[in-house]
Amino acid sequence: MRRRRERDDRSSESPLQREPSCRSSESPLQREPSCRLKAVLRTDFRERRSAGGLAGVFSHLSPLASHLCAVAVFVFLLASTLARAQSSTPREETWVTNGTVRAIVRTTDTVYIGGAFTYVGPCTGSGVPLDATTGLPLATFPKVNGPVSACIADGSGGWYIGGEFTQVGGVARNRIAHILADGSVDLSWNPNANNSVQALAVSGTTVYAGGGFTSIGGQTRNSIAALDAATGNATAWNPNAVRSICALARGYSR
């Protein structure tokens, strides 16, 4: 009977009365650290923040709670800084696959990958000239970050290329570019097509481009344009095609 009476007496107590360390009659700063932290956060957070910012909140917490909050803020800021510092540009020395990678696991000194590929090798970019004897890619050619659909010699050891890329050798070039004989990107030639370039032809001092663009060489040109080989500007020639151009051929007089 005595045990039943004790249980009945305890059940009639309020939740705060059952916890001696968190009694409501005590002020927030008189309670135990865990209860004090809860009380401050629940009752005084908005007032203390409006009065003194985060410093106002920290100054009223216990030393342990204050340190923990400060560490949490520091870790959050550090993680945000590291996330912003990550580059979206792949490292050139990292090898790539010829298909999809679906799983990656890293150990201390090894990275294991799995997926739907049959080859893993150095990243060459999307357009690469090959040595006629060895079949190996020429190291001096700049890496292209997107599909190359057309390529034609410039007559001086360099190349004009067209496709759906946006960078060549780390230089911004939208879908058309001129690569000089030494492998560098021609910085003075930038027609800046607004859509794909699928075909190229060179005749004298003119580069003809065909594709799905509507603007190139600083002018409105629908799918086909003639570009100055020295400046990249569009010439006055404007056939105004109604559909995309996928092939160009240079004519020869007899």
Image (cartoon, rainbow, N blue to C red):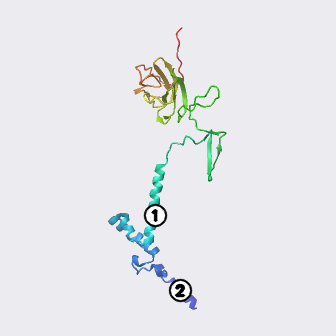
Three-letter amino acid code at the position of disc 2: Asp
Identify the element where label 2 is drawn: helix
Query: Which of disc 1 and disc 2 is earlier in sequence?
Result: 2
Q: Quadrant of the N terminus?
A: bottom right
- Is 38 located above or below residue 245 in the figure? below
Mark 2, other Cα within 10 Å: few <14 / some 14–19 / many ≥20? few
Residue 143, percent across and down? Answer: 53, 34
Identify the element where label 1 is drawn: helix
- Is 63 located above or below residue 168 in the figure? below
The mark tally for this picture is 2
Residue in the image at 45% along x and 71% along y = 64
Residue 40, percent across and down? Answer: 40, 71
Would residue 168 be found to the left or right of residue 122 on screen?
left
Which residue lies under the disc numbered 1?
71
Asked whether 57 or 10 is in front, the reply is: 57
Mark 1, other Cα within 10 Å: few <14 / some 14–19 / many ≥20? few
Q: Which mark is residue 8?
A: 2
The residue sitting at the bottom extreme is 2
Residue 152, percent across and down? Answer: 53, 23
The residue sitting at the left extreme is 51
- Is 201 located above or below residue 174 in the figure? above
Q: Which mark is residue 208?
A: none
The residue sitting at the top extreme is 254
Would residue 107 be found to the left or right of residue 233 on screen?
right
Asked whether 50 or 138 is in front, the reply is: 138
- Is 253 located above or below residue 61 in the figure? above
Quadrant position of residue 236: top left
